[in-house]
Amino acid sequence: MQLQIPQDLLYEGLQAVGRAVSARNTVPILSGVYLQAVGEELILKATDLELAIQKRVRADVRQDGEIVLPGRYLMELVRRLPPQEITISVDARNSTARITGSDCEYLIHGFPAEQFPADADEHQPTPITVNGLSLRTLLREVAFAASHDESRPAITGVAFSVKDSTLVAMAADGAVLAYGQVEVENPADTAFSVIIPGRSVQELIRLLGEHEASSCEILPSGSQFIFRLGALQILTRLLSGVYPDWLKLLPTEYPSVLHLDRERFLRALERAALLAPKGTVRLETRVDGLHVSANTPEVGQVAERVPAALEGPGFLVGLNVDYLLVGLKASSSPTLLLEFATPRSAVRFRSIDSRSFFCVLPLLSF
């Protein structure tokens, strides 16, 4: 294997796949990055067996070949090199790579490429296509609600399902629930329901933001799931188990609806949180808007009014301010609807410009 590639392109590819390099060295080859030179491309891959990321970059390939090189050392070396053309020459017999620049030369010991975990089944279905920005917005609004309780693995992920032309994403930790949906192109009329690990979803959010892909292809593949963003591919394993049907537990009607500015509400809550006993804030509707208050006897109390328009009966509720803040920060809508059903149920907020997203929070005593 031999190729030439600009330093910046090589580092860009290594950055893209680097987050999937295993930090644990129980399986040494998982600490490496797989490099394959073929045609006019260099293919870079890394995996920790839960998440795999692949990136294709243009290269001047003189001889096809493949090798696995230590990920941390390779990334740091390439990062520290000045902008220039880099030559990579591989001796497959002893799994070494010679990396040459304009006035430097390095020899790195690697691993035989055949030891690297195999790709997913090549018999992949017709992809489902979704707008990249819409998918990132959906995931940001939902993923924060996934549980961190490893004793219940299924709810540490995000439930994904596709039917007809709609993709639904939902996450809940038993207290907070976030739900959203987005339109997709589904030419093969594929239908599925899967649970994607929370970490994989966070990496997908990051990569969607960094690469600004206009569209994303989604391919279910057995016990794995593939997202393609142009030259970038993310492959994740799926979580086993049955995701709870949280939606059946929610109220079907919310007679009280409050229209309010998300940013003003968010800032008022941040200030109230400073004096919120055990994280509880009180929300009360009045003629002049929504009143946010909190009280800690040893420290003091806060009361603040947020302009709002109410439809239906007024309400007085207690909410966990930490849950509410995280949910509001995940939302991308400038205007929100805060909805109340009964004194024994939860509060729901959703985007006024998108009835497909909502977040449900439990009521607290105060």
Image (tube, rainbow, N blue to C red):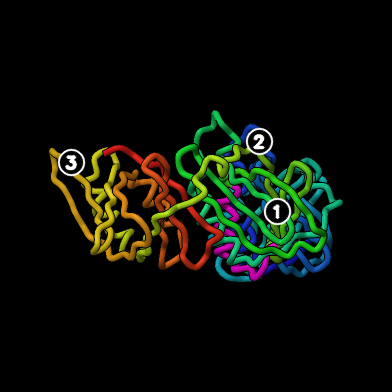
Does the rendering let one see residue 298?
Answer: yes
Residue 112 place in picture, x, y as percent: 78, 43
- The answer to whether residue 87 is left or right of residue 272 is right
Mark 1 falls on what kind of element? strand
Tell which of 354 and 84 is nearer to you. 354
* Category of crowding for the residue at label 3, using alpha-carbon neighbours closer than 10 angstroms: few (below 14), some (14–19), many (at least 20): few
Query: Where on the picture, by quarter, is residue 88?
Result: bottom right
Q: Write down the residue under mark 1.
A: 162
Q: Are marks 2 and 3 in contact (CB under 8 Å)?
A: no
* Category of crowding for the residue at label 1, using alpha-carbon neighbours closer than 10 angstroms: few (below 14), some (14–19), many (at least 20): many
Mark 3 falls on what kind of element? strand
Type of amino acid under label 1: Val
**Tag count in the figure?**
3
Q: Residue 212 in magenta?
A: yes
Tell which of 192 and 46 is nearer to you. 192
Residue 69 place in picture, x, y as percent: 68, 48
Residue 27 place in picture, x, y as percent: 67, 34
Tell which of 122 and 164 is nearer to you. 164
Residue 242 image label: 2
* Category of crowding for the residue at label 2, using alpha-carbon neighbours closer than 10 angstroms: few (below 14), some (14–19), many (at least 20): few
Dot placed on the residue nearer the N-terminal end, 1 or 2: 1
How far apart are the two marked residues, 2 and 3, measured between alpha carbons?
42 Å
Mark 2 falls on what kind of element? loop
Query: Where on the picture, by quarter, is residue 65?
Result: bottom right
Residue 296 image label: 3
Numbered range of the magenta stretch? 200-216
Type of amino acid under label 2: Val
In this view, the residue farthest toward the top is 151
How far apart are the two marked residues, 1 and 2, measured between alpha carbons?
16 Å
Residue drawn where x is 53% and y is 40% of the image:
249
Residue drawn where x is 22% and y is 50% of the image:
293
